[in-house]
Image (cartoon, grey):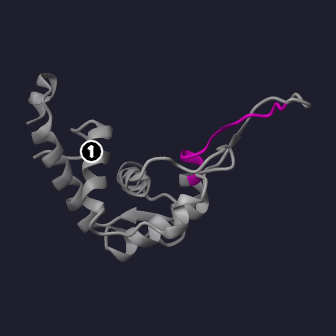
Amino acid sequence: MVTLYDVPADDLIQEVADRLEDRIEQPDWIQFAKTGSNRELPPQNDDFWFVRAASVLRKLATKGPIGVERLAVEYGGRKRGSTRYRVAKAHTSTGSKKIVRVILQQLEAEGLVESAGGDGRRISDEGRAFLDDAAASAFESLDRPELERYA
């Protein structure tokens, strides 16, 4: 049986994102929102919301239970400190907590994620089955001979 650990992450995330397009809705405000204070522009990909939701679901499965704050740190990055008039070293910045929180709420409404009390959220049994099914589907479409030993 193929699990989410047997498939490369980018292939699994793309497969899960395609499946999530039917289950969750992209908010209207996402075309104006940045993904963090370290970014200058909003995301340019049309399917950004579904790819981020798939990535959050995979992170919950591999690292869960995990909360909004830690997920925001996972999606953060380096914030440049220098401008034309001021020189400062770069610092790290967290990602948008609003995006992570709304995605978690949508996944919880679908039954793929459940609350873990004070520890954040964890993946539910339905969510684990959803990811494993997507992993099996993604594994079948792969044409990589080095992964045949996992079949």
Which residue is found at the position 20% from the left and 60% from the top? 129
**Residue in the image at 37% along x and 76% along y:** 109
Q: Quick one: which residue is furthest to the bottom in this view?
A: 109
Whether residue 85 sits left or right of residue 125 in the image: it is: right
Q: Position of residue 2 (x, y in %)?
A: 14, 45
Above or below, comparing residue 83 to residue 115 in the picture: above
- Taking the image as shown, residue 102 lies to the left or right of residue 142, namely right
The amino acid pointed to by label 1 is Leu
With 127 as the anchor, is 92 left or right in this view? Answer: right
Judge the density around disc 1: few (<14), some (14-19), many (≥20) Cα neighbours within 10 Å: many
- Dividing the picture into quadrants, the one containing residue 127 is bottom left
Q: On the rendered image, what quadrant is the C terminus found in?
A: top left
Taking depth in this image into account, of 37 and 151 the one nearest to the observer is 37
In the depicted view, which residue is nearer to us: 107 or 61?
A: 107
Q: Picture coordinates of residue 135 (x, y %)?
A: 19, 47
- Which stretch did the figure color magenta? 72-83
